[in-house]
Image (cartoon, rainbow, N blue to C red):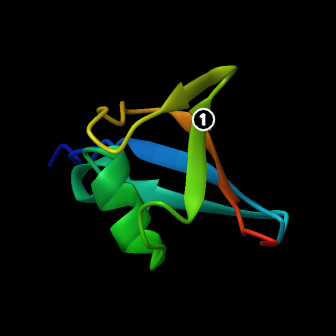
Amino acid sequence: MQEELRTPPPMVRVRLQPEEKVVELPRHKVKSVLTLLRALGIRPGTAIVARGRELLTPDRAVLPGDELLVRKVTSAG
């Protein structure tokens, strides 16, 4: 019998700041920045999301293999 090799699902790597925590999420659960924030329990508007040097809006797609930065922001008003 030939053993079937399963390909692991594409993952998205997320670095959370200011916690300096890294998490990996399956891409099929986070297809947009908005669903990524929801999966992390972060309200839109309370964090910025970046891919490299590019800031991403909530409607932008998250791609398989992405490495994203999610930086929580607060107002000191």
- Could you tell me how many numbered marks the image carries? 1
The answer to whether residue 29 is above or below residue 11 is below
Residue 10 horizontal side relative to residue 28, left or right: right
Residue placed furthest toward the bottom: 41
Q: Decide which of 26, 39 is in the foreground and name it.
A: 39
Report which quarter residue 68 is drawn in. Answer: top right
- Nearer to us in this view, 54 or 64: 54
- Please name the residue shown 48% across and 73% down the image: 42
Vertically, is 68 above or below 15? above
The residue located at (83%, 65%) in the rendering is 18
Which of the 4 quarters of the picture holds residue 72? bottom right
Q: Which residue is mark 1?
A: 50
Extreme residue in the front direction? 77
Q: Residue placed farthest to the top in the image? A: 53
48 sits left or right of 17 in the view: left
Q: 54 left or right of 37?
A: right
Q: Secondary structure at mark 1?
A: strand
Q: In which quarter of the view is residue 29 placed? A: bottom left
Residue that lies at the very extreme toward the left in this rendered image? 1
Where is the C terminus found, in terms of image quarters? bottom right
Q: Residue 24 location in percent, x, y?
A: 55, 58
Residue 58 position in % (x across, y down)? 34, 45
**Residue 1 appearing in the image:** yes
Tell me the kind of residue under disc 1: Ala
Q: Is residue 8 visible?
A: no
Left or right, 17 with reference to 33: right
| Within-10-Å neighbours for mark 1: few <14, some 14–19, many 20+ | some
Nearer the observer, 75 or 29: 75
The residue drawn where x is 36% and y is 36% is 62
Q: Is residue 27 above or below residue 62?
A: below
Q: Out of 56 and 14, give the one closest to the viewer.
A: 56
Q: Position of residue 7 (x, y in %)?
A: 31, 41
